[in-house]
Image (tube, rainbow, N blue to C red):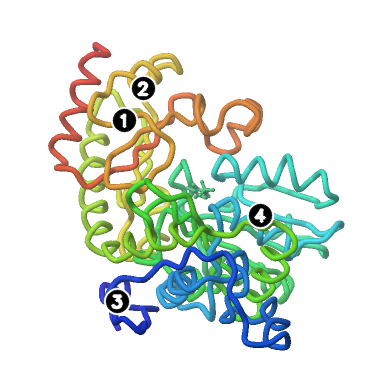
Amino acid sequence: MKRSTQVIHAGTERDPYGSVTTPVSRSGTSGFASVDEAGLFASEPDLYGYTRLGNPANAALERRMAALEGAGDCVVTASGIGAISTVMWTFLKPGDHLLADTALHGDTHALFAHALTRFGIEVDGVDFNDVDRVRDALKANTAIVYFGSPCNPTLKVNDIAALSALAHTHHPHVRVVVDNTFATPYLQNPLALGANLVVHSTTKYLGGHGDGVGGCICGTKADVARLRFDGIGHATGAAMAPDTAYLVLRGIATLSVRMERHCDNAAKLARYLAGSPHVARVHYPGLAADPGHAVAVTQMRAPGGMVALELAGSFEQAKAFVNGLKLIRIAVSPGGVESLIEHPASMTHAHARLAPDERPAAGIAPTLVRVSVGIEDVDDLIGDFDQAFRAMGD
Ligand SMILES: *Cc1c(COP(=O)(O)O)cnc(C)c1O
């Protein structure tokens, strides 16, 4: 099956009623034929003894995501952070080393730098575009190498094949974990490039309509079994609700048409911004001048629907500009049909998540704003930027 067929059909099974959409069982637990059968449910995903470990709607989404990522298996989680924390609590132990990129989603940074370190995990962050620094930072106890691409919120592109090869050369047992939320499996497949695990916040493009917080992890059958039964089972409990699985399955059905439009609109907006005197820098891997362009064309089918920019001006002027937009709403969770904007230095990467002295290394400039480019008519989006720039004066 081709990708745009897979997003609609992969993982669906015929139920006794011939339902065309996935039925949702809200039952938290299922009855068994015998005590012996019941004894197996905590190790057999298809027995559906308890929804924290498995549910038919969740299983349908897991099959679809495994197919889209080319993975042996997938487990869905309560949120993207639930997916990332489940990976960490399953595969790390005190004394292990986690090596992560400095450009991270704000709460992911907080989990690594402020939470895991309290439990005897060594955490280092370096710029993963600097391969020599990554090589130097790998240690004998490195268990996980973690990064995204393109990164949230800076749109930095990391070379998944090169970084995976480097980590595995250092130690074949290192798990390379890639956050593929911004690219989606429609545009990029990290496992095919050498990564061991892929995490997603399904809250974003996969759900696509801003109405269900969720996540998932794709990897080998053996790793996913550990993530499900040890990780979610005993360590985090971060299980997805079946109603959310239904919403995400429905969202994924239109992923191909949505992503095509997100990409078209983002490319046009990025070109417009690159020509604006109010913009000091545009971060978009589709622009030939972007430092991530060369790698993006080798590992992504298209550069995606997110654009970041640094405004010419001060921190206060950047806030005033964002406040001046009328159609594009100020909101944090990207990847939906509607365009949204956020100012990381005062929103997602502010306060306790990222201390001011941690921000420069993470690429969080005072005037950086991130635009999640929706699927509206792009002329209306450019028109909104135009009026907000005019309101700033010259
Ligand atoms: C949103 C996001 C997360 C966290 O996901 P939640 O569903 O909000 O918990 C992690 N990584 C990236 C890249 C994200 O955009």
Q: For this view, does 79 lie left or right of residue 229?
A: left
Q: Earlier in the sequence, mark 4 or mark 3?
A: 3
In the rendered image, the vertical position of residue 193 relative to residue 365, given as above or below: below
Residue under label 3, please give it.
19
**Disc 3 crowd, CA 10 A, few/some/many (<14, 14-19, 20+):** few
Quarter where residue 35 is shown? bottom right
Instruction: Tell me the quadrant of the picture where the C terminus can be found.
Output: top left
Distance (Cα) linking label 1 and label 2? 21 Å
Cα gap from disc 4 to disc 3, whole angstroms: 35 Å
> Disc 1 or disc 3, which is closer to the eye?
3
Determine the image quadrant of residue 38: bottom right
- Amino acid found under the numbered disc labelled 4: Ser
Tell me if label 1 and label 2 are in contact, CB under 8 Å.
Answer: no
Which numbered disc, 4 or 3, marks the residue closer to the eye?
Answer: 3
Callout 4: few (<14), some (14-19), or many (20+) C-alpha neighbours within 10 Å?
A: many
Residue corresponding to mark 2: 312
Q: Secondary structure under badge 2?
A: loop
Read off the residue under disc 4. 85
Q: Is mark 3 within 8 Å of ligand 1?
A: no
Q: Which mark is residue 168?
A: none
Residue to which mark 1 is pinned: 329
Task: Decide which of 13, 135 is in the foreground and name it.
Answer: 13
Between 72 and 289, the one lying in front of the other is 72
